[in-house]
Image: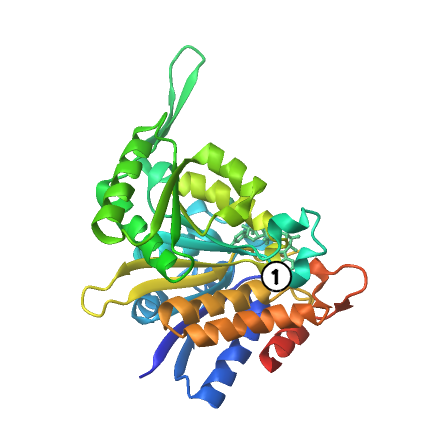
Amino acid sequence: SARKLLLLPGDGIGPEAMAEVRKLIDLMNIEQNAGFVTEEALVGGCAYDAYGVPFSDDDMARAQSADAVLFGAVGGPKWDEVAYEVRPEAGLLRLRKELDLFANLRPAICYPALAASSSLKQDVIEGLDILILRELTGGVYFGEPKQIIDLGNGQQRAIDTQLYDTYEIERIASVAFELARTRRNKVTSMEKRNVMKSGVLWNQVVTRIHKERYADVTLEHMLADAGGMQLVRWPKQFDVIVTDNLFGDMLSDVAAMLTGSLGMLPSASLGAPDARTGKRKALYEPVHGSAPDIAGKNIANPIAMIASFAMCLRYSFEMVREADLVEKAIADVLADGVRTRDILSEGFREVSTAEMGDLIVAK
Ligand code: NAI
Ligand code: MG
């Protein structure tokens, strides 16, 4: 049956990176009868220019009925002055909210060919393959009250509210254990139960879900600050790290830098399984933004976008073999000494965005 993909290239280098994923989709349709049916729509600044909103209702309906959404990047200086509610990023936020994408997967993988040119200690990063799972729709970024109030004596008070309900922790914990089962079967849960009530509840719920349904997976708990230290000291001790929105934001950015360039990092955001079909809503996107400084020059690294498509194959379509093949093609092309400018170093061959895509497709 058809596999429905909604492609949202967006702004800046988004369309350039998406074009390379298109090549893979076309190849799989022709060579493997993969049956991908694609639709394309505008998101971000280009949607604002066309419709006055960064993501239209019609396109939201398309996203709802697609099996997966592939998202490029949004934003740029052209839209810096537009109203807050219709800024480019609001298009992505709308997608996350309406698809209820509560689980953000950020892998940190170190390709062997890149380990050698890293400034970090070789043995620390070589062969690294960990997954940070960040809760994306709750916690202190969304909890109410959230305000700055005037105390009247020349002082103001800023309030953010860290808030988690049991069901939110249960569902992110379940995703963590299910992912661990497809990997090295270990979950590390990070919170700050020593100073935060949300940490106490997080710890209790993760422990209970583990006992009830996932006792075959190894579970460990770590205070998030100690976890950050361990992540830099010896990241290979981890398999899946599950943590809240705030800690996950920081820890995933730290983990990202273990592996090198922004142009290499994919991500996935998953929603709850559909009650009828069991399928999760999902959006796949590179971690990087629209990179206006290099847009339109055919020099952007398309690997983050291509690796995001590999995640889509793995998590939305259970095409595990194909996902492995795409990831291996990326590793092989890098091992051949080919580099886009952002990861270029002495002695390697520079290629354009399109050439990098072609070489990966050829592999
Ligand atoms: P950015 O990720 O776009 O760029 C940061 C730096 O990394 C730039 O020097 C850029 O050239 C480089 N870079 C990023 N991706 C690359 C790639 N694939 N290949 C080679 N080099 C790459 O972040 P920045 O500059 O903070 O933001 C630029 C715009 O993107 C802003 O409008 C921002 O709001 C937006 N943005 C959008 C995101 C999204 O769509 N999810 C995420 C982050 C930023
Ligand atoms: Mg961040």
Q: Is residue 290 above or below residue 334?
A: above
- Judged left or right of residue 337, residue 75 is left
Residue located beneath label 1 in the image = 111
Q: State whether label 1 is within 8 Å of ligand 1.
A: no
Disc 1 element: loop
Please identify the residue farthest to the top as the structure is shown.
Answer: 153
* Residue located 34% across and 47% down the image: 137
Q: Is residue 166 above or below residue 102?
A: above
Please identify the residue farthest to the left as the structure is shown.
Answer: 276
Whole-percent x, y for residue 200 in the image: 29, 32
Whole-percent x, y for residue 182 in the image: 38, 62
| The C terminus - image quarter | bottom right
* Residue located 66% across and 68% down the image: 334
* Residue located 66% across and 66% down the image: 296
Whole-percent x, y for residue 171 in the image: 27, 51
Whole-percent x, y for residue 342 in the image: 69, 58
Please identify the residue farthest to the right as the structure is shown.
Answer: 347
- Seen from the viewer's position, the closer of residues 66 and 246 is 246
